[in-house]
Amino acid sequence: MIVNKAAGLKSAFYLFPGQGAQYSGMALDLLEKSERVKCLFSTASEINGKDMTDLLGNSNPETLKKADVAQPTITLANLAAAAYLAEKGVKPVGCAGFSLGEYAALAVSGVITIEECFSLVKERGKAMQAAIDSMKDEGSGMAAVIGLAYAQVEALLAELERDGLSYLYAANINSPKQIVVSGSAGALEEAEKHFKAAGARHFIRLDVAGPFHSPFMKEAADAFVPALEKVKFKDPFIPVYSNVTGKQIRSGTEAKTLAIQHITEAVRWTDEEAAIEAAGGMECLLETGPGKVLQGLWKHTGSTLPCYAAGTAAEINGLVNNGNGK
């Protein structure tokens, strides 16, 4: 791969962001500039039964946060960025996605088709939003624990459960000192003082629709099975990685099994990052979709490999034309 000011970007490892990265207007600049992206929007609109251009351009933050809206729109934005990169001659040497972003990775690696990806994400979002709606009376959510290692968080969760504070789970292992927990609203409120007493610098409630990647989503996982059963998962033609195991997915059969576990199991992002770097074969990574969260998490690894933002036309054009990702 070449990344320099003379030749620009030719290939990279793609990282696709997940739910929470959405914002109104995302990917519309790509739509204006790319015929491939226009085709993607048309396909997504047909499968979702909605005008995706209108949905991305005119939805308020609360609407975009709902799982049945966020999941199709973020997936479209992720795949739009990948399509624009392809139009500019950039090829993925491998890919991974954070949480929902794993579906874009499965599509780009050939495990599922673009159409299957949009269909699955539509059904996944509906199933997860239905599960969230069923918890409305009690309330639920997620919080980022900053300053404690995963082992410390797990030990404290076990201690709290022994003391009668249940319904809390480690959901995202984002970095060595950033762990996200899912739980009921009451459990999260009570847990904050315990985490801070244990040394957490911050306990930040996240602006998400529900307690993702936890047993709270079992109802959603069960409801999603019929949609998955209709799709044949193929073996990947480039490396793609799993949130559930933190390792490379070797076959379509494995990918399909993991897709069910994915809804209720933790995102082992630090393991995934380590596996990606250990595999090698790349000179840079691209956050292929909205936001710069994964770029920030990659920096926490201490890797010498750079990770650049590639979610907008301006960012991608800068990489292709200048080769410096700035």
Image (tube, rainbow, N blue to C red):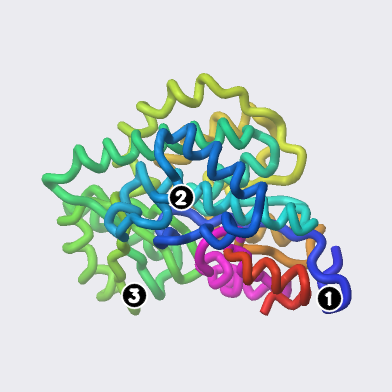
Q: Is residue 325 visible?
A: yes
Residue found at x 36% / y 68%: 145
Q: In the image, which disc is placed on residue 53?
A: 2
Residue depth check, mark 1 versus mark 3: number of the one nearer the observer:
1
Q: Which of pointers 1 and 3 lies earlier in the amino acid sequence? A: 1
Q: Position of residue 55 (x, y in %)?
A: 39, 49
Q: Amino acid at mark 2?
A: Thr
Label 3: few (<14), some (14–19) or many (≥20) C-alpha neighbours in 10 Å? many
Residue found at x 69% / y 75%: 325
Label 1: which secondary element: loop
Q: Determine contact: label 1, label 2, CB under 8 Å.
A: no
Q: Which of pointers 2 and 3 lies earlier in the amino acid sequence? A: 2
The quadrant where residue 137 appears: top left
The C terminus is located in which quarter?
bottom right
Q: CA distance from mark 2 to mark 3?
A: 41 Å
Residue ID for mark 1: 4
Q: Is residue 248 visible?
A: no
| Residue span colored magenta | 288-311
Q: Position of residue 54 (x, y in %)?
A: 40, 50
Residue ID for mark 3: 200
